[in-house]
Amino acid sequence: MTEPCRLCPRSCRADRSRGKTGYCGMDGTLRLARAALHMWEEPCISGTRGSGTVFFTGCGLRCIYCQNREIALGRQGKAITVERLADIFLELEQKGAANINLVTGTQYVPQILTALEGAKARGMKLPVVYNTSGYERPEILRLLEGYVDIYLPDCKYMEASLAEAFSHAPDYPEVVKRALAEMFRQVGPPKLDAKGYARKGMIVRHLILPGHTTNSRKVLEYLYRTFGDDIMISIMNQYTPVYPQEKFPELNRRVTGREYNKVLDYAISLGIVNAYTQEGETAEESFIPEFDFEGV
């Protein structure tokens, strides 16, 4: 799967082991931008302890509005060894993390698996969260079975035209459907411990994009018709315009209260009850961490 690289649905076949970079922007070197406790995930992930988030450099989707663009494009990342990654997992556990949260790690799945093996052999007991854009190959997800306890995927689009315009991935709707099915097969319905922390299950995130509530309604309908109450859905209004968009001016503003309420009303009409929502001016809060190599 790695020589040439076919880890993500792009299957760009770059020979990353020989220094070539794939669509994700990465060669064969493992790179991180941050590894620290993060308080801004869903309550069952962060709680009061914080999620032990590990931000990997590079991304196979690379949406034009990405809030983490510098690391998604591979511009910001520190090279480390697999042994160091295992150390980082254990250090986050020692800091009191509720879980190990692997953020956009698709391009490093082989290294992640080796590091998890090493950390578990040394006593790590935290549940593992796989935090992903949802643009995944089921064949790669199957390699993660038994290692990942909680899947935290996005479901960005059910409109192929938007997926092509914003993420250069017109196949995203069909890809994410297959990926979500595989994730759910592995982990099943959500299970929380006595303190409300997730121990198993799938939480699907959907970020509402300004001007595109129809897409959001299609996403929610698909998720509920397919999985019902057996997953949690996180309906997010935190979209933040970070980079000017000349071709798509609607992306230069935040989601309005009217737009967000329109989507929430639709979720209620569908019968969705297992959902997280965001209140207030969430787009103004610190959801975007500093990628200063903390903990790396």
Image: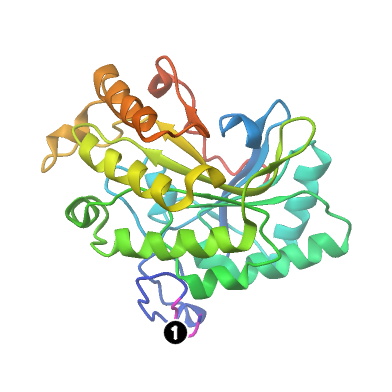
The structure residue drawn at horizontal position 45% and vertical position 58%, both measured from the top left corner, is: 58
**Looking at the magenta stretch, what is its main secondary structure?**
loop
Give whichever of 160, 28 is nearer the camera. 160
Left or right? Give the position of 263 relative to 77.
left
Q: Residue 99 falls in which quadrant of the image? A: top right
Amino acid type of disc 1? Pro
* Spot occupied by residue 91 in the image (x, y as percentages of width and height): 79, 46
Asked if residue 97 is positioned above or below residue 156 in the image, the reply reads: above
The structure residue drawn at horizontal position 50% and vertical position 81%, both measured from the top left corner, is: 1
- Please state the extent of the stretch shown in magenta in the rendering: 2-6
Q: Residue furthest left?
A: 247
* Spot occupied by residue 177 in the image (x, y as percentages of width and height): 39, 60
The figure's colour scheme reads rainbow
Q: Secondary structure at mark 1?
A: loop
The structure residue drawn at horizontal position 52% and vertical position 40%, both measured from the top left corner, is: 291
The structure residue drawn at horizontal position 74% and vertical position 52%, both measured from the top left corner, is: 89
Give whichever of 232, 95 is nearer the camera. 232
Left or right? Give the position of 118 relative to 228.
right
Asked if residue 45 is positioned above or below residue 188 in the image, the reply reads: above
Give whichever of 188, 55 is nearer the camera. 188
Sort mark 1 into few (<14), some (14-19) or many (20+) by Cα contacts within 10 Å: some
Taking the image as drawn, is residue 136 in sight? Answer: yes
Question: Which residue has dot 1 on it?
Answer: 4
**Residue 65 among magenta residues:** no
* Spot occupied by residue 87 in the image (x, y as percentages of width and height): 78, 55
